[in-house]
Amino acid sequence: MKILYIKRETKYEKRHTVKMGELTTKVTYIKKYLLGLPIATLHKYRETYYGEVKDCNDCMLFV
């Protein structure tokens, strides 16, 4: 077992954008793990309907 490793995980989330409203999209998280426990999220990005890759800072988490 590795002590320190980086893992990529993709899951569907409901997001809210100002222009489009509610949006269900695939969000990919790149996290750093230490002994199996996540310590930091290095990057978070989403894939749009047209296949573009965008940073998640321009949309809010829809609650």
Image (cartoon, rainbow, N blue to C red):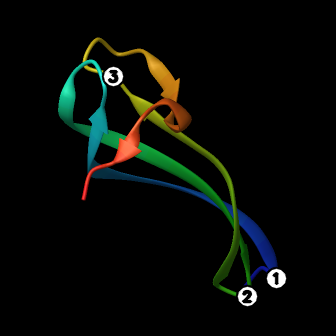
Q: Residues within 10 Å of mark 3 (few under 14, many from 20)?
A: some
Residue drawn at x 50%, y 37% as measured from the top left: 56
Q: Position of residue 3 (x, y in %)?
A: 82, 82
Quadrant for residue 17, please give it.
Answer: top left
Residue drawn at x 32%, y 41% as measured from the top left: 26
Q: Amino acid at mark 1?
A: Ile
Question: In terms of secondary structure, where does tag 3 sit?
Answer: loop
Q: Residues within 10 Å of mark 2 (few under 14, many from 20)?
A: few
In the picture, measured across the screen, residue 4 lies left or right of residue 9, that is: right
Q: Quadrant of the C terminus?
A: bottom left
Q: Nearer the viewer, residue 24 or 28?
A: 24
According to the image, label 2 marks what residue?
A: 35
Residue drawn at x 31%, y 26% as measured from the top left: 18
According to the image, label 1 marks what residue?
A: 3
In the picture, measured across the screen, residue 54 lies left or right of residue 7, that is: left
The answer to the question of whether label 3 and label 2 lie on touching residues, with beta carbons closer than 8 A, is no
Furthest residue in direction right, as rendered: 3
Give the label, 1 or 3, closer to the camera: 3
In the picture, measured across the screen, residue 63 lies left or right of residue 43, that is: left
Furthest residue in direction front, as rendered: 18
Question: In terms of secondary structure, where does tag 2 sit?
Answer: loop
Question: In terms of secondary structure, where does tag 1 sit?
Answer: loop
Q: Position of residue 11 (x, y in %)?
A: 33, 53
Q: Is the residue 52 above or below the residue 63 in the image?
A: above
Label disc, if present, on residue 48 of the rendered structure: 3
Return the disc, 2 or 1, that comes first in the chain's sequence: 1
Return the disc, 3 or 2, that comes first in the chain's sequence: 2
Q: CA distance from mark 1 to mark 3?
A: 34 Å
Q: Position of residue 15 (x, y in %)?
A: 29, 43
The answer to the question of whether label 2 and label 1 lie on touching residues, with beta carbons closer than 8 A, is yes
The answer to the question of whether label 1 and label 3 lie on touching residues, with beta carbons closer than 8 A, is no
